[in-house]
Image (tube, grey):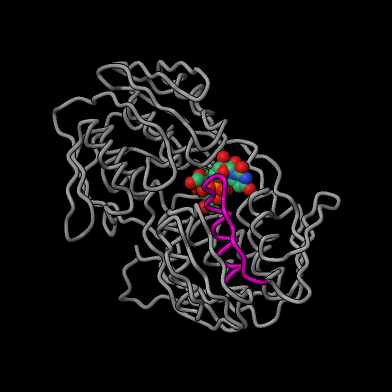
Amino acid sequence: MDRIRIVGGHRLNGTIPISGAKNATLPLMIASLLTDEPLILENVPRLADVILLQRILGNHGVDLMIAGKRADTDPNSGRTIHLSAKQIVDTTAPYDMVSRMRASFWVVAPLLARMGEAKVSLPGGCAIGTRPVDLLIMALEKLGADIEIESGYVVAQAKRGLRGGRIEFPKVTVGGTHVALMAAALARGTTEIENAAREPEVSDVADCLNKMGAKISGAGTSRIVVEGVEKLHGATHSVLPDRIETGTYAMAVAMTGGDVVLQNARPELLMTALDVIRKAGATVTSTNEGIRIARNGSGIEPVEVTTEPFPGFPTDLQAQLMALVTRAKGTSHITETIFENRFMHVQELARLGARIRLYGDTATIEGVSRLRGAPVMATDLRASVSLVIAALAAEGETMVNRVYHLDRGFEKLEAKLNACGAQIERLSA
Ligand code: EPU
């Protein structure tokens, strides 16, 4: 297994290009199952999760073509992929695939909507919590699906097609909203989705579906209305920039000090997080290129933050923020309300010298003046990158083990940080 070696203490200066969003790319790729015409996605990041989903979709019959690059293309721009689900050859998504990437469970919606049947393995728990799919199943039942759980599989049928209905989510769910949108797009009649997730990735998927001929209004608000259509067609869509990658590098710069432009980043996708980073003592400015983030001289201020669905502070930046305030001039409190077990980074940050106590869903972080490098390992994507952030500011060497977590969600992490003066290298096994 690869490891990443970081020697801390270097300020970050320069430019970091922000990639297309992982959490929009995955549902957009899945949406290709809704039509027999090609869906062309631009600005797709090179990530392990994307490659895994390509394989999963291939199983269902999706042909994938990755467009080549011309010599004059910006090497930092994402890839363009063509997905063509002309014929669905298999409506089953097996356990060994779904258990490796939870988002692949979402194929249940387009398979059911287009083929009238789907058999998809329950994904099981994961490092950040139990993560049930009861609300996704509820949404499909509201659209007329018959659903049974058999030997660990969700077996869904709608022999005469799905029909519009009213779906009211008792809790905001991103995956539930994606599933509801994809299923409702091809259902007969109108669907109302109440308490829908307002995450920008949901709006991006809705935009793409509308380009494919769907009739969706209200995406980005908590009430979405979908007029079902009989058929969707091909389209071309460019994936929006990754707000979590943006916030992650912003926190890295706030941590080390320095001055970096996050190219292609869009501030409106992470206003709450940028406000928190400002409160922590960094200067954040919007520029023509993206977002400029700098911290020169001043120390890191403590913060009080609670994770919330969009537009609140994202759970996917909680671990990175915690890394940042390990060196604050005072005590911070961070409360996690989205996932019940998303504190696996706490013990590892402690190995670098952080002082963190956990009471239920709240972490109390007493800032320390210095962190020291150590070997660490992590159990999920965002926890891993929080260790990288801490290591960038720690004295001496940190070895981050289980790097495959990082490869799932951060494109060219070492290259992007190295280009700004960090000392970080990958050691291949
Ligand atoms: N929930 C239920 N029942 C359900 C579905 C969700 O109780 O049927 C609960 C979850 O257990 C959780 C809450 O609702 O407590 C929110 O979960 P949500 O469904 O919104 O999460 P998700 O769709 O599984 C996506 C992202 C996550 C991100 C969350 C929250 C993708 C591929 N994943 O997951 O991203 O943390 O929304 O914003 O979009 C990551 O990228 O590292 C990551 C974990």
Q: Position of residue 382 (x, y in %)?
A: 47, 40
Q: Examine the structure image and report whether residue 250 is included in the region drawn in magenta.
A: no
| Residue pictured at 67% horizontal, 54% vertical | 138
Q: Position of residue 6 (x, y in %)?
A: 39, 34
Q: Nearer the viewer, residue 334 or 377?
A: 334
Q: Hey, which quadrant is residue 417 in on the image?
A: top left
User: What is the residue that sits farthest to the right in this orientation?
Assistant: 151
Visible in this render: residue 260?
yes
Q: Position of residue 27 (x, y in %)?
A: 54, 62
User: What is the residue that sits farthest to the left in this orientation?
Assistant: 297
Q: Quadrant of the C terminus?
A: top right
| Residue pictured at 32% horizontal, 17% vertical | 331
Q: Hey, which quadrant is residue 87 in on the image?
A: bottom right
Identify whether 262 is placed above or below 298: below
Q: Quadrant of the N terminus?
A: top right
Q: How many marks?
A: 0
Q: Position of residue 367 (x, y in %)?
A: 32, 18
| Residue pictured at 50% horizontal, 25% vertical | 361
Q: Examine the structure image and report whether residue 181 is included in the region drawn in magenta.
A: yes
Q: What span is colored magenta in the figure?
A: 163-185
Visible in this render: residue 406?
no
Q: Is residue 271 left or right of residue 299?
A: right
Q: Nearer the viewer, residue 15 or 291?
A: 291
| Residue pictured at 75% horizontal, 54% vertical | 121
Identify whether 31 is placed above or below 372: below
